[in-house]
Image (cartoon, rainbow, N blue to C red):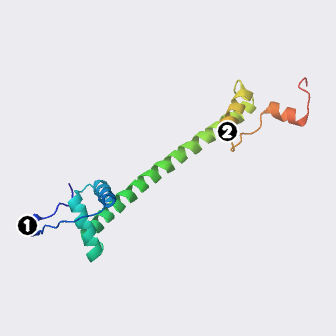
Amino acid sequence: MADEIDTSETARLLLRVPARLKDQVQERAAANQRSMNTELVAILEEAVNGLSGARLRDLLDDYKRTKENVEILSASLNSAKDQQAAIEREIFDRIKRAELGQLPEADKLIKEASRILGDKQAPMSWSEKVEKAGIPKAL
């Protein structure tokens, strides 16, 4: 386990604690990938001396890894947003061409795009514009 104790300068200590406290220390030791003994020494050092150098290094390492992960995820999110914007532009371009009669099944395509895009409404199709204006379809 990490942070094992140098046994050349150790003293034996018999310690009685409530069972629930023992369980909490055991959980903390597992979370920190340490033996219970090493965890108890770290807890005692922190209580007596303040934050230990080893614990501070661990925290700084965790912070550095987390910061790097955030930067990677942020870059991935920005890339995904750029891809989404490019796809949306292509969808609207195709809708525009469909309304000009350059694509078959224009109304079906436009309605499907509107359903998928949700709040980013696609332009209204010609048939919807005609219907909204109250122009009879026979014309």
Question: Which residue reaches farthest left?
Answer: 8
**Could you say whether the residue bearing mark 2 is in a helix, strand or loop?**
helix
Mark 1 or 2, nearer chain start: 1
Circle 1 residue: 8
Image position, residue 112 (x, y; %): 68, 31
Q: Quadrant of residue 58?
A: bottom left
Which amino acid does the dot numbered 2 rest on?
A: Phe
Q: Residue at x 62, y 41 (%)?
A: 88
Q: Is residue 42 left or right of residue 63?
A: left
Circle 2 residue: 92
Cβ atoms at labels 1 and 2 below 8 Å apart = no
Which amino acid does the dot numbered 1 rest on?
A: Ser
Q: Residue at x 41, y 52 (%)?
A: 72
Q: Is residue 37 left or right of residue 118?
A: left
Which label sits on residue 120? none
Q: Quadrant of residue 5?
A: bottom left
**Could you say whether the residue bearing mark 1 is in a helix, strand or loop?**
helix
Is residue 24 placed above or below 93 in the rendered structure?
below
